[in-house]
């Protein structure tokens, strides 16, 4: 083989590898929790390769109109101490016509004040859009629910926080009347489908999204404290 032909072969091989990389994307394994999680539990999860943590930062707490989760700050500090640097939170907003919920702006102000008071470094606030039988949220009818959801989006956009939407095809259809209803498909989507498949593939598309950045694939973990997800890196 001549030197020139070797060069051409090397170029061809590099092009082949580059073409293959177009179809490959790395995934980040994540844990999320709505409970107090100890440093030791986070450390174990981190050691197992779950390098992203998502913590419930605000809970519906319909009896008091919504509140910052009492475990948020402690869980955040435990995650940081365990080595986590990629930390998001999720906001389970208080709403529902039978409750005296704080305004969405007020709920977000409480979140912002918590960030500031505790020097928290949070990546994305995920808006949790799902029904809760205990508080009977999202009970405005499908049109009213969409109006409420638009108010949610407007409120968080006004803060300048980085945000995304968490939901599932079933919840979306139940709340808005159809999986084809679009709220804000430009926002990143973290969707739940408990199928133990660790990919970002959406089996049932909804909300105008054709792709997602996160997939919660199971609510089972060794500690019993976490749901498990994968995210685009």
Image: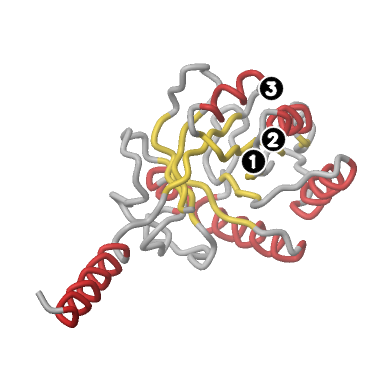
Element on which disc 3 rests: helix
| Residue furthest to the front | 2
Front label number (1 vs 3): 3
Q: Which residue is mark 3?
A: 39
Q: Position of residue 104 (x, y in %)?
A: 74, 52
Give the spatial CA distance, label 1 vs label 2.
Answer: 5 Å
Q: Which residue is mark 1?
A: 92
Give the spatial CA distance, label 3 vs label 2.
Answer: 22 Å
Q: Position of residue 135 (x, y in %)?
A: 62, 31
Q: Are marks 3 and 2 in contact (CB under 8 Å)?
A: no
The residue carrying pointer 2 sits among few (fewer than 14), some (14 to 19) or many (20 or more) residues within 10 Å by Cα, namely many
Taking the image as shown, residue 7 lies to the left or right of residue 121, namely: left
User: Of the residues under marks 1 and 2, which one precedes in the sequence?
Assistant: 2
Q: Which mark is residue 65?
A: none
User: Of the residues under marks 3 and 2, which one precedes in the sequence?
Assistant: 3
In the rendered view, tell whether residue 28 sits above or below residue 226. below
Taking the image as shown, residue 34 lies to the left or right of residue 193, namely: right
- Quarter of the image for residue 181 reads bottom left
The residue carrying pointer 1 sits among few (fewer than 14), some (14 to 19) or many (20 or more) residues within 10 Å by Cα, namely many
Give the spatial CA distance, label 1 vs label 3.
Answer: 24 Å
Q: Which mark is residue 59?
A: 2
């Amino acid at each position: 083989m001549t030197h020139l032909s070797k060069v051409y072969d090397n170029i061809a091989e590099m092009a082949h590898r580059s073409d293959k990389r177009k179809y490959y994307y790395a995934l980040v394994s994540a844990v999320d929790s709505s409970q107090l999680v100890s440093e030791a539990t986070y450390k174990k999860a981190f050691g197992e390769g779950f390098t992203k943590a998502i913590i419930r930062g605000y809970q519906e707490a319909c009896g008091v109109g919504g509140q910052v989760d009492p475990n948020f700050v402690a869980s955040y500090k435990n995650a940081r101490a365990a080595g986590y640097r990629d930390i998001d939170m999720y906001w389970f907003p208080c709403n529902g016509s039978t409750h005296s919920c704080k305004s969405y702006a007020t709920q977000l102000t409480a979140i912002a004040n918590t960030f500031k008071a505790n020097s928290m470094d949070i990546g994305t606030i995920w808006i949790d859009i799902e029904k809760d039988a205990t508080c009977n949220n999202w009970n405005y009818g499908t049109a009213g629910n969409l109006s409420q959801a638009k108010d949610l989006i407007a409120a968080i956009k006004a803060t300048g926080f980085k945000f995304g939407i968490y939901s599932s095809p079933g919840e979306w259809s139940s709340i808005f009347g159809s999986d084809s209803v679009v709220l804000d498909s430009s926002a990143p989507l973290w969707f739940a489908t408990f199928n133990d498949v660790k990919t970002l593939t959406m089996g049932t598309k909804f909300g105008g999204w054709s792709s997602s950045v996160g997939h919660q694939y199971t609510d089972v973990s060794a500690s019993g404290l976490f749901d498990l997800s994968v995210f685009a890196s």
